[in-house]
Image: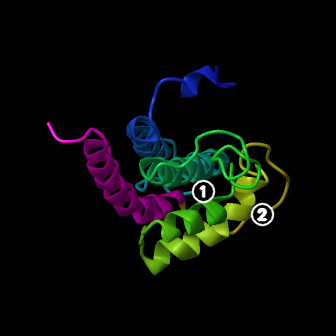
Amino acid sequence: MSANPLLEGRSPQQMAIGVISDAEAYREAALLVEPKEEPLFVKASLVAPAWHLLCHSTELAMKAFLLSHGADPGSRPGGLLHHSLRHNLVALYERAQEKGLTTSSKFEEILAELSPFHEAHIFRYRRQGYISLPTPHIIAEALEPVIANIKGVVRQRWMESQGPR
């Protein structure tokens, strides 16, 4: 029996389907929290939650891509829940690149900026002070084609895992 009942009885490719759907939902939620049409200074207190949603969306997208390639979903060394990967956006992205993921240089730059904050849970457990990062809508726009690409890969890899019909 697995230590995590959520992982039982499902292939990594099957798990990837739900994970990429969640990635898309978190990206969309960030846009509801911090809409492009509303200036940042109107609801500045919602910027950190929007950044958190976008970071989590990015984390889930990378994990969906890796799951679709058969990654271990568990917490053993090398697994997606192991402390060396769990919330490390750069490490997840590098692992995904090794499996063939390509993105824009703009996305790579944004990812590098966000990763230390996400890994340290800065957006979840806010510290006092000013943080200079791209606005949530800029991040969401850079993330949208990445999620769309990964969604296609996830579907294709799942279909391949099912064998001929």
Residue 130's tag is 2
How far from the left and from the top, in percent, is residue 148? Answer: 32, 55
- Residue at point 42%, 69% (across, down): 100
Instruction: Tell me if 51 is positioned left or right of 121 in this view.
Output: left
- Figure colour scheme: rainbow
In the current view of this chain or complex, which residue is farthest to the front? 164
Does residue 99 lie above or below 31 as drawn? below
Q: In the rendered view of the protein, which quadrant contains the C terminus?
A: top left
Query: Residue 158, how many percent across, how many down?
Result: 31, 43
Q: Main secondary structure of the magenta part?
A: helix
Residue 64, percent from left and from top: 46, 48
Residue at the extreme left of the image, as rendered:
165
Residue at the image point whose x is 72% and y is 46% from the top: 82
Local crowd size for mark 1, using a 10 Å CA cut-off: few (<14), some (14–19), many (≥20) = few
Please state which of residues 118 and 9 is positioned toward the viewer in this rendering: 9
First-in-chain label (2 vs 1): 1
